Image: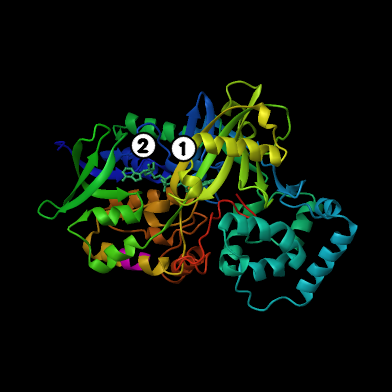
Amino acid sequence: MRSTTFKAVIAGAGPAGLTAAYELSKQGAAVVVLESDPRYVGGISRTVNYKDFRFDIGGHRFFSKSREVENLWTEIAGPEMLQRPRSSRIYYRGQFYTYPLKPFEALSKLGLIESVLCMLSFVAARLRPIRNPKTFEEWVSNQFGRRLFRIFFKTYTEKVWGMSCSEISADWAAQRIKGLSLGSAIKHALLPKGKPKDRNQVVKTLIDTFRYPRLGPGMMWELCAEKVRQLGGVVMMGRRVVGCRFDSANNSWIVTARNADGELEEYRAEHLVSSMPIRELVAQIEPQLPDAAVQAARSLRYRDFLTVGLIVNDRGRFADNWIYIHDPGVQVGRVQNYKSWSPEMVPDARYSSYGLEYFCFEGDGLWATGDRELIELAKSEIQKVSLAASADVVDGCVIRQPKAYPVYDDAYQQHIATIRKALDEHYPTLHLVGRNGMHKYNNQDHAMMTAMLTAKNILAGERKYDVWAVNQDAEYHEAGAAGEQAAQVETRVPLSKVAGSQLQPRSDSAALPLGQ
Ligand SMILES: Cc1cc2nc3c(=O)[nH]c(=O)nc-3n(C[C@H](O)[C@H](O)[C@H](O)COP(=O)(O)OP(=O)(O)OC[C@H]3O[C@@H](n4cnc5c(N)ncnc54)[C@H](O)[C@@H]3O)c2cc1C
């Protein structure tokens, strides 16, 4: 065991773990970060380098309604940040539609008769909306009309979730597509774009520009790790946390990590900050939590994701950042064009690098398919959707991301409540932060805000802030009525019937019908 007793040992060097480490190090607290990946920091927000072509795990926009988070990004990587225009389209049955949808363009591509039917169906939905919409299908039909729902939402959503839109809860649609309707889309298309008075007025799905580090999101987290080290913090790569034991005699945590050579190392700290998946963490805690909490953690579920990176001769076929593939004839859900995120994502401007995103479960057919076969599949599908000729693909790689999404099923809120209660009662110096760390399907800004507040709690020596009251927009609401409300808004269940699982979703909502 290392002789040092750290202020905090932090499991995971993703946005949450590194933010916590940075905030603590700035105040002179001794920290050690243990990251299982041997090479990359950044977690799901890392950037993978394949022969100097850089790939995100899904494109990562840097946008937050929280000024504090935006400022932290600037502090870490200000000069490296580009302001990028957003450009995305939908591919559906041989046509490309600008996204966010431009009503007049969409209607003209649909043809006169279909357009008239769409408008009539929209008017009908406005005149006679479904009262208390419960499903995704009902909610979207109310906003856009049934016909547009069928064309622009149904196929894609069912493709990525692998389940009927009538099985997906309306709450999820309301949360992810908030503020948007055909009316607001038309207004957006027609009216000159005034600057919103404050960031909170921005409709999330319609953000026109966003920030992006010139070498991808991983650059942000590499710079952050460097800053932590400069401040005296320790960031250990290739260290998988395998045991978390609380030593009550010394009121400290002894965390065991397995290094790349398979050897076990021990680290002692006053506090343990965990951004690793709750399911994994709870199984490691000693003395064990009560049975109910252990069972609850075992019941948490995750969705997985893989990207096939293709390097292609650039024929200038498309310049979008990404394209949603609604077409039911291919398995790919979305295609990223990394050169459009930043020109520096490719080492040679004659080439483009695309990421074909497939949504799956660890161990299922797609996940288990060999890399070579997946690259062949991607090559044929990129041609089918007219974005590149297979013959122009010169190389490829596969990037797998287990536990990309914590699944919100019928039971997860109850499981999390049980685990939280047990942790609060038994281990006040164990802090959960981030996405899988809190089982919250949210962006970097949320992960970072939970870590920033945790650092404040640790430095204060008391839980001044309830990290569970940070909402999906990374806004903190004081405990009490407002806090409760924020937590409820955020924990709406997107799927109504995943748990029992006659219905297995094939994807989750990073691939949104609207949104990122
Ligand atoms: C397809 C996709 C697109 C996205 N797009 C955006 C976007 O546009 N903008 C945005 O802001 N966010 C986006 N996100 C969300 C963003 O990726 C996450 O919110 C963010 O990475 C969460 O940070 P985190 O530190 O909580 O978790 P993670 O990024 O998951 O990091 C956790 C870290 O812990 C490590 N770890 C896990 N277990 C152990 C262990 N036992 N021991 C040691 N280390 C361990 C992991 O290796 C990882 O490095 C997207 C996510 C996906 C899946």
Across and down, in percent, residue 508 comes to 53, 55
- Callout 1: SS: loop
Q: Nearer the viewer, residue 14 or 113?
A: 113
Above or below for 337 versus 104:
above
- Callout 2: SS: loop
Residue at x 17%, y 53% (from the top left corner): 246
Residue behind mark 1: 46
The amino acid beneath tag 2 is Asp
The magenta segment is 416-420
Is ligand 1 less than 8 Å from the beta carbon at label 1?
yes
Across and down, in percent, residue 262 comes to 23, 35
Instruction: Confirm whether residue 341 shows in the render.
Output: yes
Residue at x 54%, y 38% (from the top left corner): 374
| Number of residues whose C-alpha sits closer than 10 Å to that of mark 2, classed few (under 14), some (14–19) or many (20 or more) | some
- Majority secondary structure in the magenta region: helix
Above or below for 317 versus 165:
above
* Mark whose residue sits in front, 2 or 1: 2
Across and down, in percent, residue 131 comes to 67, 79
Q: Nearer the viewer, residue 375 or 492?
A: 375
Asked if the residue at tag 1 contacts the one at tag 2, i.e. Cβ–Cβ closer than 8 Å, the answer is yes
Residue 37: mark in rendering: 2
Q: Tell me where residue 439 sits by quadrant.
A: bottom left
